[in-house]
Amino acid sequence: MRRHLLGCVLLAAAGPLAAGVTPPLPSVVTGCEETSADRAELALCLQEAALEWNLVLHERYATLRAGLTGEPARRLLTSQRSFIRYRDLHCTALAGFAGSASMRRDPVVWQTCNLRLTLQRIEELHLYP
């Protein structure tokens, strides 16, 4: 049932994306918070949402990349690889601080960070011609 509700949240959020605007992070997080019984379930819901939005990110990147050649294509590739590296390292560090008492990274913090930066990057890629 949670997966169905998550799908509804993602579908509701897809409307603005089709117009070139990403949905606000709170709509995704709030949907997960409303359908999750505990923190572990919340982390799983956020992980599923992050996977869905990573697919959207990949599709947007692939569409842009297909229209480029030479130096512009190389710059976009470098930019995308740098973004992914930054996102993953930044979220790992942030989640590590949040979970520092137990010496484990906090999965809710990591997934929320991942979603926030992924949605931001999708929006940025819509600025490219």
Image (cartoon, rainbow, N blue to C red):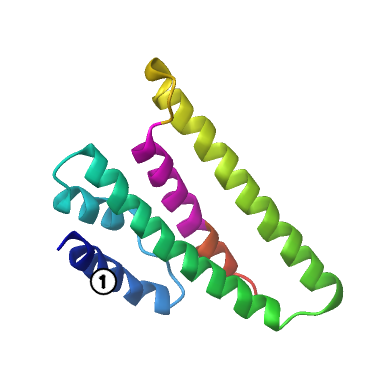
Q: Which residue is mark 1?
A: 12
Single out the residue that lies furthest toward the bottom. 67
State the quadrant of the N terminus: bottom left
**In the image, residue 127 lies at what x, y percent?**
59, 69
Question: Is residue 129 shown to the viewer in this render?
Answer: no
**In the image, residue 99 lies at what x, y percent?**
39, 24
Closer to the camera, 34 or 13? 34
Single out the residue that lies furthest toward the top. 101
Q: Residue at x 26, y 71 (%)?
A: 12
Q: Residue at x 24, y 65 (%)?
A: 9
Residue 112 in the figure: left or right of residue 79 = left
Question: Is residue 34 shown to the viewer in this render?
Answer: yes
Element marked by disc 1: helix
Residues rendered magenta in the picture = 106-120
Residue type at the position of mark 1: Ala
Q: Residue at x 42, y 52 (%)?
A: 115
